[in-house]
Amino acid sequence: MGFRSDLKFGQKYEEIAIEELNNEGYQLVEKAPNKYFPDYDFIMSKNDINIKYEVKADKQAIKYGNFAIETESSGKASGLALTTAEYYIYYLINEDNTHIKYIIPVVILKQMIVDELYHRLIKRVYGTSKKLYLFKLELIEQYKVKQCDDEPEKKKVKKAD
């Protein structure tokens, strides 16, 4: 996938995250300005408390057992290094269009890098200068929220007899 298709894919999961949080009683306060690298994706509110979220969707994590956190792109700080979000909502996408959702405090992700809990540091992706930290999925198991169907309208419902 190219940058634009990756962006569109990510935006789909931003909308899914907003809908799921709305269903839990949160209200959308603001979406990030329409730019390519905002420092958060949206702000939700519940009980008069505003919370900033960053959303990531990963098609490779389940296959390889890792999740990636970006901190640099083309020699400039990006991703976790720039975010002002309090939480990352990280979706692991299965081949069958289901996903597993994690809600991880940003402070935990940053501390995992400081503590060198990553098992690999990647500095180049698809010919582009990047800095990605790879972590084993078991490190975030406690932040797993749920596994669900990505496109429920495609599920067939059996009629009662």
Image: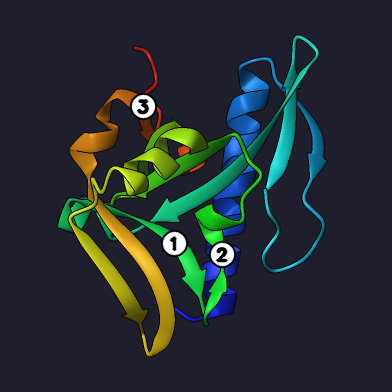
- Which label sits on residue 78? 2
Give the residue type that dot 3 points to.
Tyr
At mark 3, the secondary structure is: helix
Other-residue count near label 1 (Cα within 10 Å), few / some / many at <14 / 14–19 / ≥20: some
First-in-chain label (3 vs 2)? 2
Disc 1: which residue: 70
> Number of callouts in the render?
3
Image quarter hosting the N terminus = bottom left
Farthest residue toward the bottom?
127
Quarter of the image where one finds residue 128: bottom left
Residue ID at (56%, 67%) = 77
Other-residue count near label 2 (Cα within 10 Å), few / some / many at <14 / 14–19 / ≥20: some
Residue ID at (59%, 45%) = 54
Residue ID at (40%, 34%) = 102
**Residue nearer the viewer, 18 or 72:** 72
Disc 3: which residue: 143
Give percent across and percent down for residue 80: 51, 53
User: Which mark is nearer the camera, 3 or 1?
Assistant: 1
